Amino acid sequence: MSAAPIRRFPWFAFALLLLGICGLAAAWISVAAISGAPCAWMAPVAALDAAWLLRLARVAPGNGRMLAGVAATAASIALANWGIVAAQMGVVMGLGFLDSALRLGPSLAWTMVDLASGPAEFAWTAAGLLLALIASR
């Protein structure tokens, strides 16, 4: 029995990555809400998740898969940070999570992430993106 052929970039890889991005961001937001910290150590987990999903979708190795892995990891990081800020601001302003997330602007989100993050959080984020680059190739 031969192995299944490796395709260039299957259509369901996009759906699988989108599901992985949203699922990992939801888990990250939950862990951050429970711990009360940004939990930037989840960035390498996002990188490994993206690389695993790309391999699961049988995306052909190469620059395209590497770029998709890094982009999915960056999207997970951005969505998780957006959600963490939205959850914290929603509590302060008396809004639900979705209302807060929809009203949050990029300037306020970046300011809040910058204030809550130190060098360690930025190092974890960089490590996650670097791991995505290596693991997704």
Image (cartoon, rainbow, N blue to C red):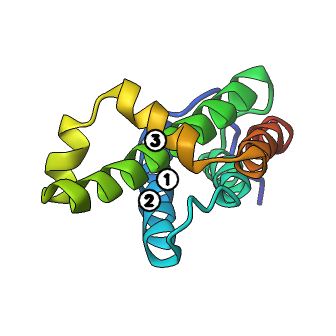
* Residue that carries the numbered disc 2 in the rendered image: 23
Q: Do the residues bearing badges 1 and 2 touch, measured as CB atoms within 8 Å? A: yes
Q: Quadrant of residue 45?
A: bottom right
* Residue that carries the numbered disc 1 in the rendered image: 20
The CA distance from mark 3 to mark 2 is: 23 Å
Which residue type does callout 3 highlight? Met
For image coordinates 74% across by 38% down, the residue present is 129
* Residue that carries the numbered disc 3 in the rendered image: 112
Secondary element type, mark 2: helix
Of the residues tagged 3 and 2, which is closer to the observer?
Answer: 3
Local crowd size for mark 3, using a 10 Å CA cut-off: few (<14), some (14–19), many (≥20): some
Q: Quadrant of residue 65?
A: top right
Describe residue 134's horizontal placement relative to residue 84 as left or right.
Answer: right
For residue 60, which numbered disc appears in the image?
Answer: none
Describe residue 16's horizontal placement relative to residue 97 as left or right.
Answer: right
Check the image and name the residue furthest to the top. Answer: 63
